[in-house]
Image (tube, rainbow, N blue to C red):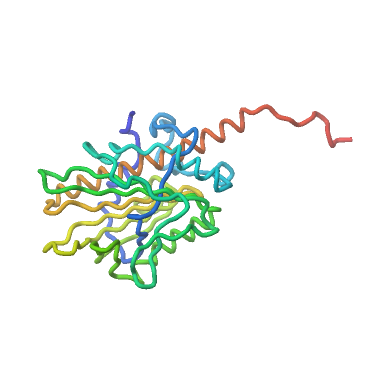
Amino acid sequence: MGRGAVRSTAALALLLAVGCTNSGHGGDSARPPTEPAGATASPSASHSSATASSRPYTLAESAAPRTRAAAVAFLRGLTVQPDYFGTGFRRRDPYELGPTSWAVLGADCLWRREPVPSTVLASLTRSFVGPGADGRGEVYVSLTVTVHASVRQARRDMASSLDEPLRCPRERLNATDTVEGMASRGDPFDEQRNASTDDDLTEFGRYVVDGDAKPRRFDWFKHRLGPVTVAATVRHAAGESETEQSAVTSAALAGVGYVTANVDNYGRDRAASASAAPSTAVKGAGDE
């Protein structure tokens, strides 16, 4: 697959160059992604003519799944490969969570899985693990794709994610891991550093594992493509240098870019199929 054309590389360069503001996070360590029937695995092939300044990766609401069954089929068919996130990555056990539940940050600032609300059709999380630099432990990546009932609901979900670190400066991911010190920002397409999707949220902070003396870096990314959101968390290995951290972050963000490109491809394929379908209209009907 020709991955060099994926625009997440450019987005990452802008991302690392711009400072962050304090807000937003969406506990995707427990949320869900899936695969769409008909989605292609080549994010660059059908986008050679698109540029960061011309249009974002997106999914028209008219082309998006409209029922829970269609949303689940879409998620199951969406190509998400371990090596999207770097060399040596493999599936983690458990590999999938969802598609009828997702992670919710409770009033007690603990992430827990709950049934998806009526505003969400389906959500699927896939988890991966990769080797840390120089044998310094493992890197954990979780990627969640969620199909919302509408673009409006997807936008509300993005706004809710921005609010989460404000109400919970310390978030419990599970029984042993805590996320804290998050700095974040959000940008719509073509504003500031976002050169790839309709909306973009990013957070950087640290997570603390009970019993460990030093915190580790924690990255969180979330993109909106019409009514679909694609989110990923990255838990870095202990002892990484700044250079190694940047390399891991770059690879993970590129992986998110491959997935957003596949979602965009799905929408383009649907639009192409609709335009190619023969018309059933009767010439002159209704003109009497």
Q: Residue furthest right?
A: 288
Residue 271 placement, left or right of 21? right
Residue 69 x/y as whole percent: 55, 44
Residue 43 x/y as whole percent: 39, 34
Residue 128 x/y as whole percent: 28, 44
- x 24%, y 48%: residue: 249
Nearest the eye: 51 or 267? 267
Q: Quadrant of residue 110?
A: bottom left
Residue 132 placement, left or right of 182? left
Residue 214 placement, left or right of 189? left
Residue 55 placement, left or right of 111? right
Residue 224 x/y as whole percent: 44, 51
Quadrant containing the C terminus in the rendered view = top right
Nearest the eye: 90 or 79? 90
Quadrant containing the N terminus in the rendered view = top left
**What number of labels is visible?**
0
- x 48%, y 57%: residue: 116
As displayed, is residue 62 above or below residue 188? above
